[in-house]
Amino acid sequence: MANHGKLEEYDSQEEWSHYIERLEFYLEANGVDDEDKQLAILLSVCGGKTYKLIRNLITPNKPSEKTFAELVELVQQHQHPKPSAIVQRFKFNTRFRKPGESIASYVAELRSLSEHCDFKSTLEEMLRDRFVCGINDEQIQRRLLAESSLDFKKAIKIATSKKGIKGKTKYLYGRAS
């Protein structure tokens, strides 16, 4: 097996899901398709603390008696249980653009907040609506509301373009213009 890249042990400061994403990239880069090998690699690179946690979570079973996917999900549920969608939607729906915050940062924050909202097929619509409601710039907001057909991508484009907004705008890209 070719050895492309390096994967250090899991550090509890990192989100488990991010560690697993990196592990999956490592497995893909090294052509590891066999589930038994994936499990063996996970258990050999995760580190002593994580291995002990896995053992404790599945006792009296042994890690080798579970699948890669089962162990990943087990640690995920232990480390970062799925947050309440209603709490996450509350946080999302009450997020307004802060004075001095760039539009790009606001968009990134909205995307981050939407992760556990379980919006499914309405995600882009919800992002657009929260963006328009929370933009915190009256001129930009008026311009967005004047659009008869507005999707999230177009809303961002309008908000970040001075051409589409008459007069001066406050805090476009985080600075007065």
Image (spheres, rainbow, N blue to C red):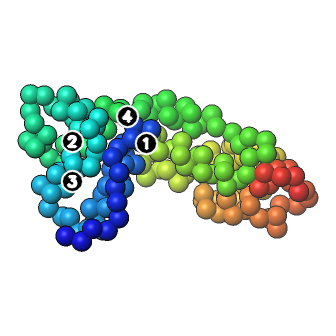
Question: Disc 2 marks which residue?
Answer: 71
Question: Which label sits in the foreground, 1 or 2?
Answer: 1
Disc 1 + disc 3, Cβ < 8 Å:
no
Image location (x, y in percent) of residue 126: 55, 47
**Helix, strand or loop at disc 2?**
helix
Q: Earlier in the sequence, mark 4 or mark 3?
A: 3
Work out whether residue 137 or residue 102 is closer to the camera in this orientation and state it. 102
**Helix, strand or loop at disc 3?**
helix
Amino acid beneath label 2: Leu
Q: Earlier in the sequence, mark 4 or mark 2?
A: 2
Question: Disc 1 marks which residue?
Answer: 14
Residue shown at the point (41%, 32%) measured from the top left: 83
Disc 4 + disc 3, Cβ < 8 Å:
no
Question: Disc 3 marks which residue?
Answer: 41
Task: Determine which of the numbered discs, if any, sits on residue 116 in the image.
Answer: none
Few, some or many C-alpha atoms within 10 Å of disc 4 (few <14, some 14-19, many ≥20)?
A: few
Question: Disc 4 marks which residue?
Answer: 80
Amino acid beneath label 3: Ile
Q: Earlier in the sequence, mark 2 or mark 3?
A: 3
- Left or right: 94 as drawn, with respect to 138: left
Residue shown at the point (34%, 55%) measured from the top left: 7
Q: CA distance from mark 2 to mark 3?
A: 12 Å
